[in-house]
């Protein structure tokens, strides 16, 4: 009995290590890539997502294909719509000098960008090894940063999660009949900002503020 518990504990720990977490950090997490996946509410893993399989299911890249090269291009437009919430406490005497009520902030930007997907069978005779990529590039701006208003509650804190470019890479192959394996990597861009404020207590001297922001690429399996 103790040995069985140990085995189950080891399996559970392994799943926690290898299973991906739901980050909800980009357009693909919200609605998926490609018109069919978007129409299905992001449910594209089961059917493979075609040229965008590198994002949805890298193992599907190794499935048999009639075409050695697949290309897909499209425009993505997403408009966030939230249910209004009114008359909530957004300021109190614990953080300010008065009590004030207001509305939940729903002023999120629209997302407009282009998405490109491609799959290429590199070695059709050797386990059908296939490479794939899925790319999203925003058209409004390269990056966006907004901290939101102080004390005003929001639906989602990550206002810029769909306003940054992202690249998905995948490699898949067939190891046996109805058995496919795949690996994937996500290349995203992290936007961070810092503000330094120096306040003067003397009215004769001016206070200063410095703001700095940077965009760094990050690669995750």
Image (cartoon, rainbow, N blue to C red):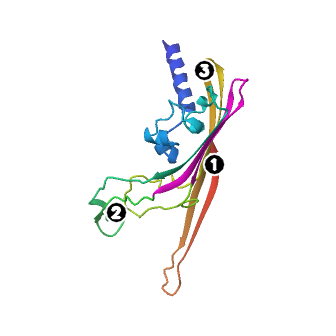
The segment highlighted magenta reads 110-137
Q: Quadrant of the C terminus?
A: top right
Question: Which label number is shown at residue 179?
Answer: 3
- Give the alpha-carbon distance from disc 1 to disc 3, as whole Å: 31 Å
Reading the chain from its start, which is encountered first: label 1 or label 2?
2
Vertical arrangement, residue 143 with respect to residue 198, above or below: above
- Give the alpha-carbon distance from disc 1 to disc 2, as whole Å: 38 Å
Q: Residue furthest front?
A: 66
Reading the chain from its start, which is encountered first: label 1 or label 3?
3
Nearest the viewer among 45 and 94 is 45
Is disc 2 in contact with disc 3, using a CB cutoff of under 8 Å?
no
- Give the alpha-carbon distance from disc 2 to disc 3, as whole Å: 59 Å
Magenta stretch: helix, strand or loop mostly: strand
- Residue at the spot 50% in from the left edge and 50% down from the top edge: 76
Is the residue marked by circle 3 packed among few (<14), some (14-19), or many (20+) residues within 10 Å? few
| Relative image position of residue 119 (x, y in whole percent) | 64, 37
Left or right of 161, for residue 94: left
Q: Is residue 169 visible?
A: no
Query: Can you tell which of label 1 and label 3 is closer to the viewer?
Result: 3
Is the residue marked by circle 1 packed among few (<14), some (14-19), or many (20+) residues within 10 Å? few
Which residue is identified by label 2? 94
């Amino acid at each position: 009995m103790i040995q069985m518990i140990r085995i189950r504990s080891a399996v559970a720990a392994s799943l926690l290590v290898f299973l991906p977490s739901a980050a909800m950090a980009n357009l693909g997490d919200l609605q998926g890539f490609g018109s069919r996946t978007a129409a299905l509410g992001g449910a594209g893993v089961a059917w493979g997502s075609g040229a965008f399989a590198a994002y949805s299911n890298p193992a599907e890249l190794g499935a048999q294909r009639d075409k050695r090269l697949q290309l897909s291009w499209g425009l993505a437009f997403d408009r966030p719509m939230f249910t209004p919430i009114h008359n909530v406490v957004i300021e109190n005497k614990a953080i300010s000098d008065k009590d004030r009520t207001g509305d939940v902030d729903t002023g999120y930007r629209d997302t407009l960008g282009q998405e490109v997907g491609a799959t290429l069978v590199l070695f059709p005779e050797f386990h059908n090894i296939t490479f794939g990529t899925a790319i999203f590039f925003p058209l409004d701006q390269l990056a966006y940063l907004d901290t939101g208003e102080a004390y005003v509650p929001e639906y989602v804190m990550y206002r810029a999660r769909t306003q940054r470019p992202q690249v998905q890479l995948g490699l898949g192959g067939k190891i046996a009949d109805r058995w496919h394996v795949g690996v994937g990597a996500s290349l995203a861009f992290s936007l961070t900002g810092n503000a330094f404020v120096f306040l003067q207590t003397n009215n004769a001297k001016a206070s200063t503020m410095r703001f700095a922001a940077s965009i760094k690429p990050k690669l995750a399996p």
